[in-house]
Image (cartoon, helix red, strand yellow):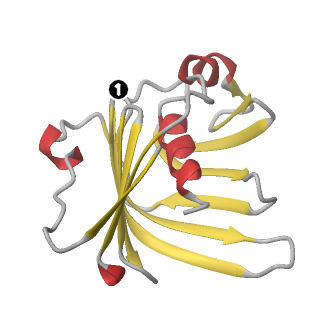
Amino acid sequence: MRFLPLFFLLTLTLFASPKELNSFNSKFIQTIVDENGKKIIYHGELWADKPQNALWVYQKPIQKSVYINGQKITVIEPQIEQVTIRSLDDEIDFLQIIQKAKKIDENRYTATVKGQTYSVLFKNNLLTSISYKDGYDNSVTIVFTTPVQNKAIESTRFKPVIPENFDIIKDR
């Protein structure tokens, strides 16, 4: 659960680039390295669509779906038959991220919001990675391996389907 705010931040960061992104889909590899060098690697797929809709589907090493719809996050964890639903705080100002994104060179941009600095990399005008240090001092890198930008995504993709037998935890 402690990484859930990171998913929200990353979703916002997708649209923080000076490049015009209205929607985004890609398989991804997310690597998190702690201060002791311990590494965990996640594989999955992301769909994101303005305004602030996202679905992160983690396939390994665990299965998990993280739905972000505006100010609500729903996490479905099939292995433990549990769903967590919570509101997101208004701690991140989406417009501030966009305004602060600055071009470093031809393909790299950076944005700093509330002390959090994001490095965003493009290749051939496609978003290829986002990296940052999270609030736990972990180095996080997400590499997008099959990026598709500005292709319509059905809005139903962002609506969670909760199995009847799953426990539901509502936080806030």
Q: Is residue 160 above or below residue 42?
A: above
Vertical position of residue 3 compared to residue 7: above or below: below
Q: Amino acid at mark 1?
A: Pro
Judge from the rendering whether residue 28 lies leftward or rightward of residue 67; answer left or right: right
Residue 149 x %, y %:
33, 39
Query: In this rendering, would 111 be left or right of 89?
Result: right
Residue 123 visible, this angle = no
Q: Front-most of 72 and 31?
A: 72
From the image, which quarter does the N terminus lie in?
A: bottom right
Indicate left or right for 60 with 98 as reference. Answer: left
Residue at position x 69%, y 26% from top? 103
Asked whether 106 or 144 is in front, the reply is 144
| Residue 17 visible, this angle | yes
Q: How many marks?
A: 1
Q: Which residue is mark 1?
A: 51
Q: Residue at x 19, y 46 (%)?
A: 159
| Residue ID at (37%, 32%) | 70
**Place of residue 97 in the rendered image (x, y in percent of width and height, measured from the top left):** 62, 25
* Residue 65 figure quarter: bottom left
Q: Position of residue 34 (x, y in %)?
A: 78, 71
Q: Secondary structure at mark 1?
A: loop
Residue 72 image position (x, y, % from top left)? 38, 39
Note whether 43 is above or below 7 in the view shown: below
Taking depth in this image into account, of 73 and 109 the one nearest to the observer is: 73
Mark 1: give few (<14), some (14-19) or many (20+) Cα within 10 Å.
few
The residue nearer to you, when weighing 160 against 99, is 160
